[in-house]
Image (tube, helix red, strand yellow):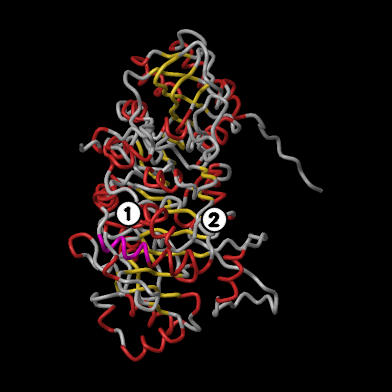
């Protein structure tokens, strides 16, 4: 006989109502709370041990709420489990230093990578896992559901409806996971208005609204000044365009952040035009509105762009190019990191970006012993999604060439996403881009992680591009051949010095390694004169004055 156990089925709902009741004293009108009462509000609705999502995206930051969280009494609130995309601000780690938070699950920590590594070594932060964005969002709906979400938007009305505008980013994923598990949502906004341009988050999903004393911090993370692009980056871009984009007819692509991909974007209207590739490559993008794409858009290369987030200064330009971007009825772009990540995972034919280290097998990582950077969305963009079922020419061609396909599917054809790593053989401060063993192993040991935090595994990487040439890894017959191909393009690094010239010649004859000469590229032409825009001023001119660079980029 099965015995039924008496159980309370609405404990979360009751807990929610208790927290709301304790915070009602701070509400003024509708759902508005005065900014001076923010710390008291947080102490009323947050409990020790809670999972708290503090919105910190690649660009927009709930900075006022982050600073307020650092001011709560650690005697009242402690051992919080922070679940957030990006660790970007000092306050994101101050909350651990003050003993308010204890555990962290996140995706990316670029600006705070060094400090986070120190905190991990000192035992101030316990890392649950370093996630890709989609992975973290997925866990929001499974075992990392926030009890309290601290989010950010441009505007709110007094009822609590939110307008996220140009930088929606992570907000919908955070709010939906929290609110529909009876959690509490607190929004920081730049201003409270009578009527919103459009409603991005409905009032029913928001509990409290606070007008911050100053606008939220936003970082132009994807802006690259063309004046800083080097001749070596132009060469790698030329090789990528001719040896990969053109060879596979890549139409649907994501560009990682960096000067290498900015160089590719700025060569499309010049070198790409010279090769007759307009309409053959780079029609559809999933990426933030990179200013470096303006010349390609203006010269008719780009059909559509969906974005993870906005980019400071691009608001007017994007609004006036509504055929290209996903704009709302109000005229401003709608970004969505979760949808863009899903598109990057399944709908694209290629991911191309950079990394900090590549090991002798072709595994890559941006996490080192001294910098816990994380990877953001790169593992989703840069993996071969096994659930894909639609075919494109470039996907099928890469699949046909994939020599080590051991998927146990018999004689069935299958495609493969192109995953390209653009890599300098020596990076800043002469740090080698190729190493015998990833620093991620040491980080795993320091942070007590179950596995080393690898960004892209070798079996997903199809190409590595350096100033030496292109290694077509997916064409290799076994791991020994892959390792030889990597050594052939690793330059004067310790790994590259192990290259065997006879072995490399054989790989070149097979088309597994291609040098600039093999690709028919005149290296003497690989210089900045090929860039469609050579500085920020020329990007503004291409945009017909619509692009308004942030002050730090206005160098004329």
Q: At 48% from the left edge and 61% from the top edge, which residue is drawn?
A: 276
Residue 256, x across and y down, in percent: 41, 53
Residue 109, x across and y down, in percent: 34, 47
Q: Residues within 10 Å of mark 1 (few under 14, many from 20)?
A: many
Range covered by the magenta-colored residues = 231-238
Question: Mark 2 — residue?
Answer: 279
Residue 4: give its label. none
Question: Mark 1 — residue?
Answer: 531
**SS at mark 2 in the image:** loop
Residue 344, x across and y down, in percent: 53, 52
Residue 500 to residue 40: above or below: below
Q: CA distance from mark 2 to mark 1?
A: 19 Å
Q: At 34% from the left edge and 23% from the top edge, which residue is drawn?
A: 215
Q: Residues within 10 Å of mark 2 (few under 14, many from 20)?
A: some
Residue 482, x across and y down, in percent: 43, 80
Residue 133 to residue 173: above or below: below
Whether 184 is among the magenta residues is: no
């Amino acid at each position: 006989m099965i015995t039924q156990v008496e159980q309370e089925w609405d404990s979360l709902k009751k807990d929610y109502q208790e927290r709301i009741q304790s915070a009602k004293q701070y509400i003024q009108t509708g759902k508005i709370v005065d900014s001076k009462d923010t710390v008291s509000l947080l102490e009323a609705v947050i409990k020790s041990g809670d999972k708290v999502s503090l919105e910190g995206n690649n660009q927009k930051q709930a900075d006022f709420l982050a600073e307020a969280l650092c001011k709560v009494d650690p005697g009242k609130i402690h051992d919080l489990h922070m679940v957030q995309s990006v660790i970007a601000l000092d306050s994101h780690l101050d909350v651990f230093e003050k003993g308010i938070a204890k555990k962290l699950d996140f995706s990316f920590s670029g600006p705070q990578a060094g400090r986070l590594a120190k905190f991990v070594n000192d035992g101030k932060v316990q890392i649950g896992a370093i996630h890709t964005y989609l992975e973290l969002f997925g866990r929001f709906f499974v075992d990392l559901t926030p009890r309290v979400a601290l989010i950010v938007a441009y505007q709110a009305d007094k009822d609590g409806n939110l307008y996220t505008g140009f930088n929606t980013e992570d907000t919908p994923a955070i709010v939906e996971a929290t609110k529909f598990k009876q959690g509490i949502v607190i929004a920081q906004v730049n201003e409270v208005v009578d009527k919103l341009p459009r409603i991005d988050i409905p009032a029913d999903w928001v509990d409290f609204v606070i007008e911050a004393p100053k606008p939220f911090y936003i970082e132009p993370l994807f802006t690259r000044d063309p004046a800083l692009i080097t001749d070596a980056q132009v060469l790698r871009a030329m090789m990528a365009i001719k040896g990969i984009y053109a060879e596979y007819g890549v139409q649907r692509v994501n560009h990682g952040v960096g000067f290498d991909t900015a160089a590719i974007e700025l060569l499309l209207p010049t070198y790409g035009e010279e090769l007759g590739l307009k309409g053959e490559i780079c029609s559809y993008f999933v990426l933030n509105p990179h200013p470096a794409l303006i010349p390609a858009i203006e010269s008719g290369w780009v059909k559509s762009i969906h974005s993870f987030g906005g980019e400071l200064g691009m608001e007017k330009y994007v609004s006036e190019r509504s055929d290209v971007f996903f704009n709302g009825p109000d005229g401003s772009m709608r970004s969505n990191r979760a949808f863009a990540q899903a598109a990057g995972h399944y709908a694209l034919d290629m991911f191309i970006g950079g990394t900090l280290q590549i090991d002798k097998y072709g595994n890559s990582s941006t996490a080192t012993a001294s910098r816990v950077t994380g990877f953001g969305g790169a593992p989703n963009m840069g993996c071969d999604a096994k659930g894909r079922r639609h075919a494109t020419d470039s996907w099928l061609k890469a699949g046909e060439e994939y020599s080590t396909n051991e998927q146990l599917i018999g004689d069935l054809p299958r495609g493969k996403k192109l995953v390209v790593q653009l890599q300098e053989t020596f990076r800043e401060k002469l740090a080698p881009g190729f190493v015998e063993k990833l620093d991620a192993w040491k980080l795993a040991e320091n942070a007590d992680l179950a596995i080393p935090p690898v960004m892209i595994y070798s079996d997903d990487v199809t190409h590595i591009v350096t100033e030496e040439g292109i290694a077509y890894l997916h064409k290799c017959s076994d791991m020994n051949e892959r390792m030889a191909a990597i050594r052939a393009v690793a330059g004067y690094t310790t790994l590259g010095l192990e290259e065997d010239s006879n072995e490399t010649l054989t790989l070149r004859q097979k088309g597994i390694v291609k040098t600039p000469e093999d690709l028919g590229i005149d290296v003497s032409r690989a210089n900045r004169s090929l860039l469609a825009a050579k500085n920020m001023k020329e990007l503004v001119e291409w945009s017909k004055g619509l692009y308004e660079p942030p002050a730090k980029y206005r160098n004329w």
